[in-house]
Amino acid sequence: MAVVLKHENQQERQIAGSSNRWQFPKEPFSGDLLALSQMCKSLSINLDDALENPDRLCISKIQTILSENFNNQAIQSEEADVVLKCLGFQWELHQPQLFQSKTLARLYTAALIHSTKQSLKELNRTPQAPSPEKTKERSPFKKMLVSLRINDPAVTREGWESSCPGCVRAQVRAGAFALGARVGRAHADRCPMAAASSAFTMALKSLYMSEVEIYADDVVAVLASASILQFSSLFERCVTMMTKALMPSTIKDFYLAGCRYKIQELTTACEKWLEMNLVPLMTMQSHLCHVPYDLLYKVLKSSRLFTFSEFHLLKTLILWVYLQMNKTQEIPTKEAVMTFFKSFPRKCCFLNQDAGRIWIPLFVCLRLHGITNGEELEEVRHTNFFPESWLTQIIANHYHSLENGGDMIYLKDLTTKAMRFGLLFNKEDTTHSKMISIYGFFFELKGIRHDTTSYSFYMQRIKRADLESYSRVCERSAVSLRAQRLVNYEIRAQALVDGTWRKFETNWILQKFGFKQCCKSQANGDPFTASP
């Protein structure tokens, strides 16, 4: 009589890691720390995460197998493999495209594990390529339904109603993405939900097409969608697009997006753009009121900040405060601004009021000693903006400098305290100059265009007798009779080179300026190539 022995409880073992460590396939972690460490290394999983959640081993291993199998694989048929439910809509997706998104891939593999009753050994088996006569057969993987809940207000447009009579649930297939995007865009002007889904649709559409048109109004929402989907190529494309599209109307949203998603490249680009454009451009724009406090604070502390003079920068900052206080979208007249701040009691200036104390850190960043013109100082005093102690310190500094022949003994740190003067060189200019007066000494800042892309800048001392055309500079100004003046200075030029702002500068130079010899400064190096 033949006896057949059946070992029903016999289990197979498999290699765990890159060595000969073995474990049972149905037990992701059997207590063997060395095997677990090797497995985590091969699957690029954090060991601590695996100890807290052993199921990550199964999900990550299946995800790796599937992504390798479907990477760069063409769609076998128009039949979708996955239905994604999100934002009240349904999108039908295919596996080769789905695995470009780490979030969707993780959702899919997790759903695959929970929906199947097969063993891990069967799930790990790589699907065989279909034979020519079976190309119309369905994929060996089951069509999955996955849900994604988004709480990012940049995508969901937080505060809007969750439903709209004009919105219907849509099933967007790969071949209908372009039509779906056009319909969503047209409806977006009328419906908030359609606007939210439009940006998310662009993100999903980018799984199938490499150059999807992204509208400027939607780029922040598309960036947010790419972040949620962990779609790195689309995320980087949005960042590049945003850094090249900075303007008064976008600076706020782009900067806040950079802070929210921790994009150092984008926040730095916003800071550099505002350093160049705060005074010459934003002063004339109603968008000035939207500049965030922390961004403005960083720019005011930057040594790269461009301004025509310290008084121009002060007027810009006072205008920003006025716009914050009055919540208006229109640029007010100079008289309206002065009348507003003069309305506060004379016994207590604006910055000493409860409403003004929060702005003090911004004004501490200014170099108010750089305001030397008498008319400008009178205007500052009559605005009733600054404490009397601040104004007294400014006048005292000027008095001591004049008493010492123009020496600025109160300046200890040239990097943060030196007086700032600037001029804007336009493309059509061949030469451009600006006259400045400092404690009885007169200097001319001058820029010269040598050819279409080559420029150089320098400064020179000017005699009082040669200032007929600059009578306003001389008016109510002291005049020094010293033949020579020792000046510590730096010349800096910022220009657009191949779409990127670059800085050309001298180091700090200590030089004597006279009338007969050495009256001209050193130029800022050789003529540089740029597009101003």
Image: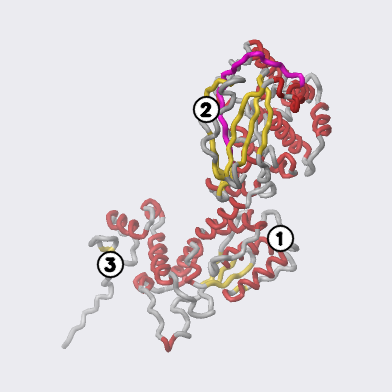
Tell me which residue sits at (67%, 56%) in the image. 157
Task: State the separation of the CA atoms marked 2 and 1.
Answer: 55 Å
The residue located at (66%, 49%) in the rendering is 250
| Residue under label 1 | 192
Q: On residue 508, which mark appears?
A: 2
On screen, residue 492 above or below 232: above
Instruction: Give the position of the N terminus as an image quadrant.
Output: bottom left
State which region is magenta.
475-494
| Residue 389 location (% of width, % of height) | 69, 17
Magenta segment's dominant SS is: loop
Give the distance between the C-alpha atoms of the residues marked 1 and 3, in whole angstroms: 53 Å
Residue 360 locus on image (x, y percent): 67, 28
Q: Which amino acid type is shown beneath numbered disc 1? A: Pro
Say few, some or many: other residues with alpha carbon within 10 Å of mark 3 (under 14 / 14 to 19 / 20 or more): few
What distance separates the C-alpha of mark 2 from that of mark 3?
69 Å
Judging by the rendered image, the residue that carries numbered circle 3 is 14
Q: Residue at x 75, y 44 (%)?
A: 286
